[in-house]
Image (cartoon, rainbow, N blue to C red):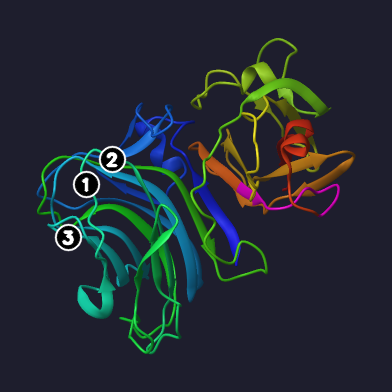
Amino acid sequence: MALQFIDGGDHYVTADITKKWSANTGATIAATGRRGGGAIRFLTAGTSNYLTKTLGAQASWVVGFAFEFSAAGALVVARFTDAGTAQCELRQNLDGTLSVTRNGTALTNGTSVLALSTSTFYYIEWKVTIADSIAANSCKVRVNGADVITVATGQDLKNTANASANAFAIGRVAVTASGSSTFDDIYICDGTGSTNNDFLGDVRIDTLYPNADGAFSQFTPSTGTSHFALVDEATPNTTDHNDGATIGHRDSYAFGNLDALTSQTVYGVQVNAAIMKDDAGAKSASTFARSGSTNTDGASAALGTAQVYVSQVYEFDPNTAAAWTEATVNAAEFGVRVTA
């Protein structure tokens, strides 16, 4: 598998949610994450509120997120969909237990004995393969690192004609609960690649901001001469910016350091750049990571006149092709490249 998306809810406000997620119905950004900082919160009772992230169609997925709720209720916490139709779901039940269903259809061994309590953050992970008849151990749920659901071999988790999902949603779907639900430290891995191919465990997502100009300063600052100072805000704006139009030009920045790690693994670095074009005509850009003297470019994205996040996960240090470490992340630069 491969790490495709992460979000800690720290670097944007409610109005910016759809710059990073594909669709939003009712989510807000709260300043009360499980480790401080931001988190994604759903408040409205009696209706369906959720965030959706569209991804490449895959059969196998592993996701994780910190989860807290303020009142008991029955609702869908997470869902994989195929072109908007639910394949399988992770549900919170009235008694606090969790269940995996096929679009609401109960599955053998699909409900936990463990019951979650209100006002407590749990780290929930869900591994699933969408198929008519699943293999052993291919659909499991973990809470705080312990298995709580292992859906029986041979169960059907494919609700549509396709054995795949192309979107993941979190929130409060089909709600019969009052109160709120809060999500933090979210990761999504898909079935591509040969790394990050199982549960990652209880992860934290640290958000870093530019604090110095890097090796490339080929864009034009909207004011002054310092490039990083125009893009170091905790939330994106269009007031000050760096402008690039020449294909191949780059702007890179040094970033603040990670909080000290002990034995933790760095599973990947996601670069999020809030970008837009300012005139008619086609224009594209990508992010890039620079370690040592080696650059690795992310996928090119076509830009519109509304600001969006162009995001890319870099699972490996470009300079060594090995996993990132605290030291290599702290020494790296990240930036933006004009691609077309």
Residue at position x 32%, y 67% from top?
A: 84
Which of 22/208 is in front? 208
Question: SS for tag 1?
Answer: loop
Q: What stretch is highlighted in magenta?
A: 312-321
Left or right of 266: which side holds 134? left
Q: State the image coordinates of residue 80 (x, y, percent, origin top left).
A: 36, 66
Q: State the image coordinates of residue 9 (x, y, percent, origin top left).
A: 43, 36
Task: Identify the amino acid type marked 1.
Answer: Ser
Please tell me whether residue 199 is drawn above or below residue 179 in the rendered image: below
Choose top left, top right, bottom left or bottom right for residue 32. top left
- 295 is within the stretch colored magenta: no
Q: State the image coordinates of residue 123 (x, y, percent, origin top left).
A: 40, 49
Q: Give the mark nearest the N terminus, 1 or 3.
A: 3
- Asked whether disc 1 touches disc 2, contact meaning CB atoms under 8 Å apart, the reply is yes
Residue at position x 52%, y 46% from top?
A: 203
Q: Which mark is residue 117?
A: 1
The residue at which mark 3 appears reads as: 93
The residue at which mark 2 appears reads as: 120
Task: Identify the amino acid type marked 3.
Answer: Asn
Which of 117/249 is in front? 117
Q: Is residue 221 visible?
A: no
Q: Residue 183 carries which label?
A: none
Q: Distance between the residues labelled 1 and 2?
A: 6 Å
For disc 2, the neighbor class at 10 Å (few under 14, some 14 to 19, many from 20) is few
Nearer the camera: disc 3 or disc 2: 2
Residue at position x 9%, y 49% from top?
A: 46
Residue at position x 78%, y 48% from top?
A: 317
Which of 95/86 is in front? 95
